[in-house]
Image (cartoon, grey):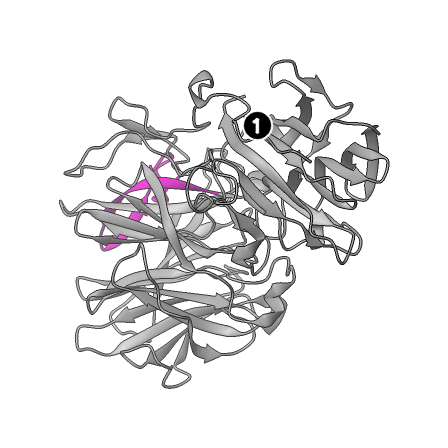
Amino acid sequence: MNLTTERSRPIADVAIHHPWFPDQGDGTYRNPVLCADYSDPDVVRRGDDFYLVASSFNCTPALPILHSRDLVNWTLIGHALKNLPHERYREVQHGCGIWAPAIRFHAEKFWVFFPTPDEGIFVVTAKDPRGPWSEPRLVQEGKGLIDPCPLWDDDGSAYLVHAYAGSRAGIKHMLRVRPMAPDASRLLGEGQIVFHAPERHPTVEGPKFLKKDGWYYILAPAGGVETGWQLALRSKAVYGPYEERVILETGSTGVNGPHQGALIDLPVGDWWFMHFQDAGVYGRIVHLQPVRWNDGWPLAGKDFDGNGVGEPVAVHAKPNVAHRGPRTAPETSDEFDAPRPGLQWQWHANHDDAWADLTVRPGWLRLIAQFSTDGNLLRLPNLLLQKFPAECFTADTVIELDAEDGTEAGLAIIGKTSAAIALRAMPGGTQFVFRVNDTDTILSANSPSRLHLRACVSSTGMTRFEYSEDGARFTPVPGSFAATKGYWIGAKIGLYCLRRNAGGQGFADADYFRFSPL
């Protein structure tokens, strides 16, 4: 097959807009500030800079690191981990991998603690949050240990708080504080259970540890991901006893389960709280709440009904920070004109750099076909995907398929279910197929080997696929697809290339991947 080298459309001819900006340009912001699945967020401030880390489950590179100067405008600057620290993750492990992490700055370096609930608690460090990051070190082996967060005390001693995964440990409503070596090389004992109140809080997880004005605080989400609330615990002693107070709940808003995140101080003395909301197919999107302190307790959001418990704000004045910059949002579109795919892309399991190449055909991404016995997309590790970036959006790409028999490549949406429009090289020519889960519909048995592909995602994840030979006149694929959330993650969209011939060498090239508002 003779692959052309020119772009299918000049970049200047296409207006590209990010589907969601939280900064409204008038000194206010709207929630969510991250309208994408940056799940289980934690944030640390270093000077005038804020750094956010999020969970990544089975996807790699793992532990995305984002940067902001104002807690509203965020950019993706890297990942703290290339691949997960176990061979089992070479295969897709839905819902496993990295759960809620914590990020801190201590002893002139950044620390990210993270759990893999089947293996234990790990830590990585870096002088610069953009990397390089150290290789992961196992702090504590154990099944069901999740959501670790460290605290280095004023006297140099160190502690770690963590929760338990009910699916692994049979416990989901206890928080434990344990002594830790100051260099985080190991835990030094069992410590103590510091909170257990299942009659009031049947689920407690995601703890974050800090000390302020002589008080030890543990912030922890309770009540479950979809419907819960945010707790604050405080004590004058590291092992308690801890008092409790609910500081954020749904209230009169439609923001379900507002909880799990980071309590952040500004240089001017103001405080803010970043947390997630489970938005179903869109994953766990991130909100920003103002915080006011009252009698030693942080109240997040607004006290709408006077009960002393905060509820989420929809619009608010931006944080009072020294640096004001342009509106930004984490990267989505990619012209494939850099040495590597953009930071927004993740594979669905531990990956090999040889799966993709941006040098052999400059300006194009070459995906090297990986063997699949059955073509099941949900078991394919070399899915190159990214998060849904907004409630409604359009994603466009161009794919050219190598003619080797058995090679298939396409535009896919993946959750607990899957759908794709794809080109498939067959002995009699190139097929164009619409795939929904295990069902293939052949739209054309003699298709061009180069097509423009489009997915139009509307509210609730309802998706319409379209295709075009010239990029100007698009034809809808009959029917629609209701995208679904994945296992603890939102639906994802992106590209794939597989081969059913075990000895084949097929590939496919993509010219760009562009998002715009629907």
Quarter residue 443 falls in: top right
Q: Which residue has dot 1 on it?
A: 396
Q: Quadrant of the C terminus?
A: top right
* Residue 310 falls within the magenta-colored stretch: yes
Q: Quadrant of residue 170?
A: bottom right
Q: Residue 240: say if magenta.
A: no
Is residue 174 among the parts visible in the rendering? Answer: no
Q: Residue at x 55, y 39 (%)?
A: 282
Name the residue at the front extreme.
2
Q: Quadrant of the N terminus?
A: top right
Provide residue 229's location: percent of width, then percent of height: 46, 49
Residue 259 can be seen in this image: yes
Q: Position of residue 36 (x, y in %)?
A: 48, 39
Image point 51% across, 50% down: which residue?
A: 228
Instruction: Indicate the position of residue 206 as horizontal and vertical percent values.
Output: 44, 60
In the displayed structure, 471 sits above or below 417; it is above
> Is 470 placed left or right of 109 in the picture?
right
Q: Secondary structure at mark 1?
A: strand
Q: Nearer the viewer, residue 319 or 398?
A: 398
- Could you tell whether 59 is left or right of 299 in the image? right
Q: Residue at x 67, y 20 (%)?
A: 469
Rendering coords of residue 176 (x, y %): 42, 73
* For residue 473, above or below residue 243: above
Q: Residue at x 58, y 30 (%)?
A: 4
Which residues fall within the magenta stretch? 285-312
What's under tag 1, amino acid-wise? Asp
Other residues around mark 1 within 10 Å, as few (<14) / some (14–19) / many (≥20):
many
